[in-house]
Amino acid sequence: MIKEEQRDFLRKILIELKEFLSREIIVKKSLLALLLGSIVFSGCIDVPVATNFVNGEQNKPQAGAHWESIANQLAKTVVEQMGSKKGVYVNEPLEQSKFDTALHNLLLSALVKEGVSVAKFPAAAEVSVDVKTQMVKFSKDRATSGYDQFDPKYDSGETPQNEVIITVNATDNAHYASSVSNVYYIADNDAALYKKPTLGRKMNVEGNKK
């Protein structure tokens, strides 16, 4: 039989072992929490800080003459990038807003004024020209700063929510002979002129099944 002194000795060892294991668990939990905290903290440091672009200028067309100026600028850039006045065909956009229709015709005229031979049919041209527009709408109350608000050069109204991105691509077979993109503000009251026509949705109607 185990003597009383031996039982006390074993009981003491078991108590010490239990305390040791408890301390180990606490230490491991603390190390794990510290490790997770350092990962989260380091992740916050690695996230880039948001910065503003350097303030610049962006035109806001408000008349047909402004659209003509846009077309003239695009035509001039296309000719400069092509390096030669090859015969071109200007494709009509598939979905035409009022602005798309006007820009197509104005760009065609502008290319002719630049001395470019504009074909009436695709087969008669060496270069195919596509005009694409994308209207985007940003949030309200976008602030502008760093300009003289009394200078008549700058628009006195609020910063428009709507903008239009215009891209003109000229392709020679499988290669781009020219590609130019410009961005403009749109007067919010004129947004309808830049919107593509809404296509009707096809709906399937089924009767009661017996």
Image (cartoon, rainbow, N blue to C red):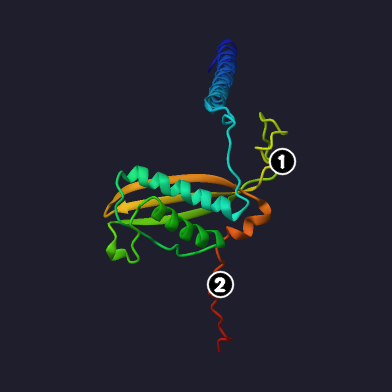
Give the camera-side residue of 173 and 138: 173
Q: Residue furthest bottom?
A: 210
Which residue is identified by label 1? 156
Of badges 2 and 1, the one in the foreground is: 1
How many neighbours does mark 2 have within 10 angstroms: few (below 14), some (14-19), or many (20 or more)? Answer: few
Residue 76 in the image: x percent, y percent? Answer: 41, 46
Residue 52, quarter of the rendered image: top right
Q: Is residue 62 above or below residue 209?
A: above
Residue 201, quarter of the rendered image: bottom right
For marks 2 and 1 on the same chain, the one whose residue lies earlier in the sequence:
1
Which residue is identified by label 2? 200
- The three-letter amino acid code for the residue at tag 1 is Ser
- Seen in the image, is 37 located left or right of residue 83? right
Give the camera-side residue of 51 and 104: 104
Rendered residue at 69%/45% (across/down): 140
Rendered residue at 69%/30% (across/down): 148
How many neighbours does mark 1 have within 10 angstroms: few (below 14), some (14-19), or many (20 or more)? Answer: few
- The three-letter amino acid code for the residue at tag 2 is Gly
Residue 112, quarter of the rendered image: bottom left
- Seen in the image, is 87 located left or right of residue 166? left
Q: Are marks 2 and 1 in contact (CB under 8 Å)?
A: no
